[in-house]
């Protein structure tokens, strides 16, 4: 069952990546406002599910505060990378969060992988090195790498915390309600500080194709995809190994890369394409050897 849940999570996260790329340049300076819409939807969905369930809230749901911080960090970095860099490179770097989960799962959760599974990580690391080499003389590539690696770190920590929370007895909807609410508050504070520091109102933002109302509206819609993905991910963590669930769910990167190539006409250098290929192979082998 955890495998099906992980695959469904990959689909949702892949769609989320496509929506991020589609909206990145349209929202421009209002990126935080778009993410605010996403987290507001998540808060409403998770809080409603918790009310319908009617179960008492536990202290374990406070893990959601930490999840809110790491989630906002990861989503903000990925969204920023999509706007200023190569969507394919950002997506692939973000998909490497299983590396963090493998290390943390071994040291914090007592989970371990078999020898061949560890060997597949060499392919993934080699792929990252190739992408890094390709990005040395490409400012856009460097931006992609920087924001993608930050998103990878944040999402990896988020996955570890999610696994720890659900195995400690936290209910998914309560955990996500706290997480989304924390994220909503963080983004709201960031947005107000941005407006204050720039000395202008929401309607005077430049370099954007969407009004503030449109940005929030699209964010609310995208939040549904994100919330479904996170519900599926937490359900998969209840029975599956953290490293394997994280690796499979990160395969949604394939959808983002295909979208970038087929619909945006993005071209990659030979080293970057080779690096992405190695990462794909590593993720696939990690699944086959599980």
Image (cartoon, rainbow, N blue to C red):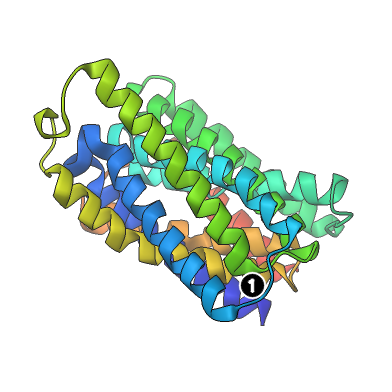
Residue 140 spot, x, y in % from top left: 33, 27
Residue 46 spot, x, y in % from top left: 50, 66
Residue drawn at x 42%, y 63% is: 44
Q: Is residue 242 left or right of residue 246?
A: right
Residue drawn at x 68%, y 46% is: 99
Q: Foreground residue, 211 or 147?
A: 211
Residue 274 appears in the figure: no
Q: Foreground residue, 249 or 237?
A: 237
Residue 118 spot, x, y in % from top left: 78, 52
Q: Badge 1: few (under 14), some or many (20 or more) residues near its Cα, within 10 Å?
A: many
Identify the element where label 1 is drawn.
helix
Q: Foreground residue, 91 or 204?
A: 204
| Residue 263 sits in quarter | bottom left
Q: Residue furthest right?
A: 110
Q: Which residue is mark 1?
A: 235
Q: Is residue 197 left or right of residue 94?
A: left
Residue drawn at x 66%, y 83% is: 1
Q: Is residue 281 left or right of residue 102?
A: left
Q: Quadrant of the C terminus?
A: bottom right
Residue drawn at x 83%, y 58% is: 113
Residue 67 spot, x, y in % from top left: 60, 48
Image vertical order of residue 82 relative to residue 201, above or below:
below
Residue 279 appears in the figure: yes
Image vertical order of residue 85 relative to residue 105, above or below:
above
């Amino acid at each position: 069952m955890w495998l099906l849940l992980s695959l469904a999570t990959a689909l949702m996260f892949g769609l989320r990546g496509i929506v991020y790329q589609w909206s990145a340049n349209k929202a421009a300076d209002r990126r935080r406002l778009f993410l605010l819409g996403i987290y507001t939807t998540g808060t409403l969905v998770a809080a409603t599910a918790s009310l319908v369930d009617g179960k008492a809230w536990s202290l374990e749901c406070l893990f959601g505060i930490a999840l809110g911080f790491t989630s906002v960090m990861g989503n903000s970095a990925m969204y920023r990378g999509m706007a200023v860099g190569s969507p394919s490179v950002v997506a692939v770097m973000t998909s490497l969060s299983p590396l963090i989960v493998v290390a943390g799962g071994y040291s914090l959760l007592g989970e371990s992988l078999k020898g061949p599974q560890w060997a597949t990580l060499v392919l993934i690391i080699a792929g990252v090195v190739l992408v890094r080499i390709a990005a040395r003389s490409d400012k856009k590539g460097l931006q992609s790498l920087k924001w993608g690696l930050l998103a990878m770190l944040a999402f990896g920590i988020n996955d570890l915390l999610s696994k720890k929370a659900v195995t400690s007895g936290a209910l998914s909807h309560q955990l996500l309600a706290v997480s989304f609410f924390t994220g909503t508050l963080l983004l709201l504070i960031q947005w107000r500080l941005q407006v204050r520091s720039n000395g202008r109102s929401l309607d005077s933002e430049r370099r954007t194709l969407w009004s503030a109302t449109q940005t929030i509206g699209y964010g609310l819609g995208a939040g549904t995809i994100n919330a479904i993905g996170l519900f599926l991910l937490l359900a998969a963590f209840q029975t599956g190994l953290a490293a394997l669930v994280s690796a499979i769910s990160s395969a949604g990167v394939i959808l983002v890369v295909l979208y970038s190539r087929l619909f945006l006409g993005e071209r990659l250098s030979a080293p970057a394409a080779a690096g992405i290929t190695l990462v794909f192979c590593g993720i696939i082998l990690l699944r086959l050897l599980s």
